[in-house]
Image (cartoon, grey):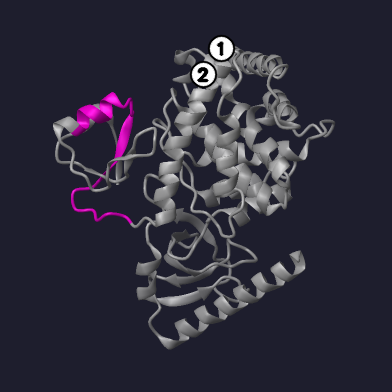
Amino acid sequence: MQFVEAKDLKPGMRLAKPIYNKNGVLLYERDTKLSVQVINNIQNFMLIGVYILEPAEPLPPLSKEELEFEQFQTVAMFQLRTNIDLLKNEKAPESLDSLVEEIIKNYGSLDHKLRFTQNIRSSGDFVYKHALSVAILAAMISHTLGASHSIQRSIVTAALLYDYGYIFVPQEILDKGDNLTAEESKQIQNHRIAAYEALMRISNGYEFPDKSLAYISQMVRYGTETNMQSLAGDAHIAWLDGTKILQVADVFDRMTAMRLHRNPISELQAIRYIKGSPKSYDKDVVAALAASICILPPGSCVDLNSGEKALVIEENPEDFTRPLLLIFSDNELCDLRQQGAKPGIHVKDVMKTMDNRIVMDEETLKQFIADEPLKETAERFRKKKRRQIIRAKAKKA
């Protein structure tokens, strides 16, 4: 799979991901062969590019949930854009509350981990796509932490709005990405503060959820990674719980999102970075993020620090970095949870496609569970995982 800019598309290329319109109607299915008309439509949709399958590449596996996630992201992005256009003119948003409720309904009450993926972003749409991804992550994290519905509403609303000041930043500055001068960074911050002040004025006639504006204020003034680095972990700031969630969701999404001029890093590397900065990011929130999304699910192909490659057979519910592996070189199991297994060996990173997806699906994974020892070990992990889930539910009850 490769990303191809819209201007470089050629007839005969095959789509790797579906294309939806703003209402969620499927326009082009995966594996669609591009024609001149389709290419013209893609360019008219203002898409900067699409993912294209290699000539002999089979269609990658996607679950129903993943396809629905793709569709939801498209519809929600246009809905968010409409509301932000109103805010831009200092008018009250018309459907922001319903968007917040949809995010919480779909992703703020999941009983399982989500395979979280993001669409590619340009300087013109990253505000909306980033805000939406942070909102979805914040909904999952807050649910895992046991937040009430009213608190989720406040956090998700703040997630959708704290970065909207970027829409006032000149395009030539946005196009520079991270290569900003001190003056340009200051200019961006001034636009973000001005946008927050506009929200305060709008709040005189529009009721934002309780604490949403307080979360936005902290994120705008101190909460993003750049500002936090300049503060050097200033202990004098009394971070609100909602802000702590937004901080983790913000930096995780920025690190793992696919951009036109910068490839993402894996969820594994991102979590390691965030966990390695305990003064900046709350450890309980980071743990909740790791418990909400798939990081090393069964079927993941991974690189080990030994140079070997392996397949994840079973997750480790206690430590996702130490799963049960099948080593490709010798076709043997490696249980990283057992301290004596392959001393010094650890997962270095995940082997992924360009759009940050897991390479192998669970159906293919079943082919590797062949002999009796492997079946017994895998079943032992499953039983242990079921016991832990039962104990966790009993404790929560």
In the rendered image, residue 209, in percent from the top left (x then y), is placed at 71, 32
In the rendered image, residue 378, in percent from the top left (x then y), is placed at 50, 78
Decide: is 304 above or below 228: below
User: From where the camera sits, is residue 279 visible?
Assistant: yes
Q: How many marks?
A: 2
Q: Is 141 positioned to the left or the right of 238 in the image?
A: left
In which quadrant of the rendered image does the C terminus lie?
bottom right
Highlighted range, magenta = 38-60
| SS at mark 2 in the image | helix
In the rendered image, residue 22, in percent from the top left (x then y), is placed at 39, 32
Decide: is 8 above or below 387: above
Quickly name the residue at label 2.
Answer: 85
In the rendered image, residue 165, in percent from the top left (x then y), is placed at 59, 19
Q: Residue at x 18, y 38 (%)?
A: 34
Does 109 lie within the magenta span?
A: no
Tell me the crowding category of disc 2: few under 14, some 14 to 19, or many 20 or more residues within 10 angstroms, Cα based: some
Does 49 lie within the magenta span?
A: yes
Q: Are marks 2 and 1 in contact (CB under 8 Å)?
A: yes
Tell me which corner region of the image, top left, top right, bottom left or bottom right, holds residue 245.
Answer: top right
Q: Residue at x 50, y 22 (%)?
A: 179
Q: Is 54 positioned to the left or the right of 175 in the image?
A: left
User: From where the camera sits, is residue 351 visible?
Assistant: no
Tell me the crowding category of disc 1: few under 14, some 14 to 19, or many 20 or more residues within 10 angstroms, Cα based: few
Quickly name the residue at label 1.
Answer: 89
**What's the distance in space between the residues labelled 2 and 1, CA to CA?**
7 Å
